[in-house]
Image (cartoon, rainbow, N blue to C red):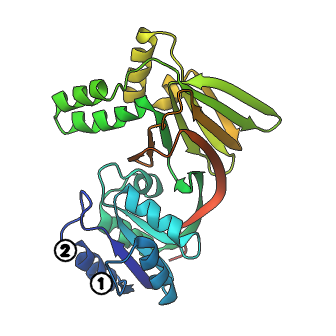
Amino acid sequence: MRLGIIVNEKSGSVPEDGRAQLAAFIAEEGHEAVLPADLEVALEDQVAALMSAGCEAIAVWGGDGTICAVLQSANGSVPVLVLPGGTMNLLPKRLHHDELDWKKIVHSVLKAPKPSWIAAGEVGGQRFYVAALFGQLTHIGASREAVREGAILEAVSILTDRDALDIESNIQVEVDQPGTLRECPATAVAVIPAEQDGLEIAVIAPDNHLDLAASAMDALARGWRESAHFHAEGATAIRMRHADGKAIPATIDGEPCEPGEVLSISYIQKAACVLVAGGEA
């Protein structure tokens, strides 16, 4: 297989010589590794160059942001082999059954490659393949990472300095489902693209600080579904706006951003083609 490779050597767990290591290992596996001719251009231009060079697939090794950018640029034209090189590694964990050893992933996938389509949500022209979180409670994710690294004071600072535990439900949410429209206020919202059934949404809208604290702890310990005050599946579209006209803070596939004060989220069933293990050897 002629396999293009894109490596972000600045990502958290990618070594400084990651590009050379990946190319050498692909060659050891009996395949041809192709690097972009110009590593200084944007990722979308690197992807376009690799496809023009006749690559049958592209391997991307980097964090969630790099992986999402490559998937969106490839747009299903070629399958993408995603390798874990960041801190959260949301999509690689899902696709490779929690395996985080990049060599084991490359070996198993190239031994029996299987192209597979995955769904996505899209907001402000940016796709997300795992989950998008909106509202002040999205900062809990950053706090959780700080706790894992032993930075307890930093974790507390994130929650307090950024008003992550602000009780006000200042996000207005509209959810389109087949035959119905649901509306509700929210302090925080989680949106997950299902493989076939549209968007899943979990809304946190607490009545008081005690309820919010309990929801925050549930979100940290058990996940967004268990902490939700409103939960729905099969949504075809979701709209949000900030009651005060402020930008809504968000974390899209692990990357913090502020996509705007009025958001429209759509569902794409076949958003990206990925390369996983499970094909015929």
Measuring 48% from the left and 70% from the top, which residue is drawn there? 80
- Looking at marks 1 and 2 on the same chain, the residue that comes earlier in the sequence is marked by 2
From where the camera sits, is residue 161 visible?
Answer: yes
Measuring 35% from the left and 36% from the top, which residue is drawn there? 141
Measuring 63% from the left and 31% from the top, which residue is drawn there? 173
Spot occupied by residue 186 in the image (x, y as percentages of width and height): 55, 25
Q: Residues within 10 Å of mark 2 (few under 14, many from 20)?
A: few
Furthest residue to the right?
179
Indicate whether 107 appears above or below 229: below
Spot occupied by residue 39 in the image (x, y as percentages of width and height): 32, 79
Foreground mark, 1 or 2?
2
Residue 27's image quarter? bottom left
Judging by the rendered image, the residue that carries numbered circle 2 is 17
What count of labels does the image hold?
2
Q: 173 or 217, which lies in front?
A: 173
From where the camera sits, is residue 276 visible?
Answer: no
Indicate whether 63 appears above or below 2: above
Judging by the rendered image, the residue that carries numbered circle 1 is 28
